[in-house]
Image (cartoon, rainbow, N blue to C red):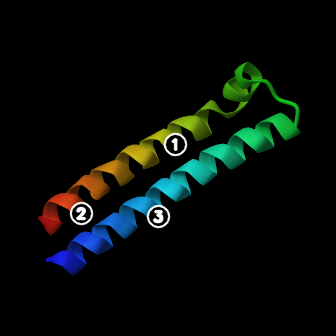
Amino acid sequence: MNKNKRNKIIYIVIMSLVVVSIIVFGIIAMYASGYTIESWCAKFWPWIVLVASALIIMGGGFYFFIKMGD
């Protein structure tokens, strides 16, 4: 039980680091290429929708993973 809980915490930390690093890298890349948020959203909104839906799906799997461990 204790090992399972530790694995869950490690999984949570890794997933949050991945999400945060993707967001930070995206923002840095956006400013480096000279886009403002408005023009970037206008140009890349399909990708934003795709990433948002992927995050929602990941969150659902994540919730299931936690419930399964309990």
Left or right: 35 as drawn, with respect to 7? right
**Amino acid type, mark 2:** Phe
Estimate how packed mark 1 is, as few (under 14), some (14 to 19) or many (20 or more) residues with alpha carbons within 10 Å: few
Residue sitting nearer the eye, 57 or 28? 28
- The CA distance from mark 2 to mark 1 is 22 Å
Relative to 7, 14 lies left or right:
right
Residue 3 vertical position relative to residue 38 in the rendered view, above or below = below
Mark 3 crowdedness (10 Å alpha carbons): few <14, some 14-19, many ≥20: few
Name the residue rendered at 37%, 53% in the picture.
Answer: 58
Distance from disc 1 to disc 3, alpha carbons, whole Å, reads: 21 Å
User: What is the three-letter code of the residue carrying label 1?
Assistant: Leu
Residue bearing the label numbered 1: 50
The relative height of residue 31 versus residue 4 in the rendered view (above or below) is: above
Determine whether the residue tagged by mark 1 lies in a helix, strand or loop. helix
Which residue in the structure is indicated by mark 2?
A: 65
User: Residue 14: which disc?
Assistant: 3
Label 3 and label 2: CA atoms lie apart by 14 Å
